[in-house]
Amino acid sequence: SQNAPPVQSEIPVVLVGIDYQLFKKRVPPATIPFLCTRNPRVVVLTNVEQQQQPQDAPCLEIVDMSVDIREIRQELPWPQGAPKIQLVFFLRWFLIRNWMRRAGQNKILAIDSDAMVTANISELAVSNAATLAQADIWLWYFPPATTGAFILISLAALEDVTRFW
């Protein structure tokens, strides 16, 4: 439609690795190179130096978010007695929000480190722009995962979610 906002031409695939080695333990070696064959940008947000980074992955960007994590832990109060292991599932959204603000990204696809995407997300978004314009959050959920394996989300939606928490 004429009133639809312009479609973001490049939607990065974003993975988050807080307090652990993403490539050493979580992501199979061929995953990132495979994602790079279909997507122009794969971003890893982390607070630890990532070892064993994949070769042949020209689209890969690793962003140190250590300072952000320290600041976010102050912004996001964690109830005494709440399981600390669950904190990472909340921190990741604040981390993605901060990176999106700085990077000027309006929309990203966040995936779990054990998930695989076979499509070019940017092309998918352009070819389905009218449908995707109907909501700021698109979730593909595959139980028993609890954080959502694939989430196409806008910065506006992340601002709302993190403000709510």
Image (tube, grey):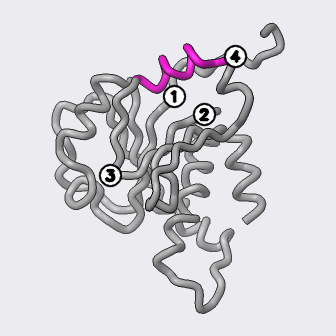
Q: Is there CB contact under 8 Å for labels 1 and 4?
A: no
Q: Is residue 157 left or right of residue 109?
A: right
For label 1, the SS is: loop
Q: What residue type is disc 1 on? A: Ile
Q: Is residue 143 magenta?
A: no
Res 37 → quadrant: top left
Q: Is residue 27 left or right of residue 16?
A: left
- Between the residue at mark 4 and the residue at mark 2, the CA separation in whole angstroms equals 12 Å
- Rendered residue at 77%/61% (across/down): 164
- First along the sequence among labels 1 and 4: 4
Q: What residue type is disc 2 on? A: Lys
Start-end of magenta stretch: 120-130
Q: Residues within 10 Å of mark 2 (few under 14, many from 20)?
A: many
Looking at the image, which is closer to me, 142 or 50? 142
- Between the residue at mark 2 and the residue at mark 3, the CA separation in whole angstroms equals 21 Å
Q: Is there CB contact under 8 Å for labels 1 and 2?
A: yes
- Rendered residue at 68%/48% (across/down): 158
- Rendered residue at 66%/41% (across/down): 137
Front of the two marks 3 and 4: 3
Residue that badge 3 annotates: 114
Q: Is there CB contact under 8 Å for labels 3 and 4?
A: no
- Between the residue at mark 3 and the residue at mark 4, the CA separation in whole angstroms equals 31 Å
Residue that badge 1 annotates: 11
Residue that badge 4 annotates: 6
- Rendered residue at 25%/31% (across/down): 34
- Between the residue at mark 1 and the residue at mark 4, the CA separation in whole angstroms equals 13 Å
Q: Is residue 121 left or right of residue 126?
A: left
Residue that badge 2 annotates: 107
Of helix, strand and loop, which mostly describes the magenta segment?
helix
Q: What residue type is disc 3 on? A: Asp
Q: What residue type is disc 4 on? A: Pro
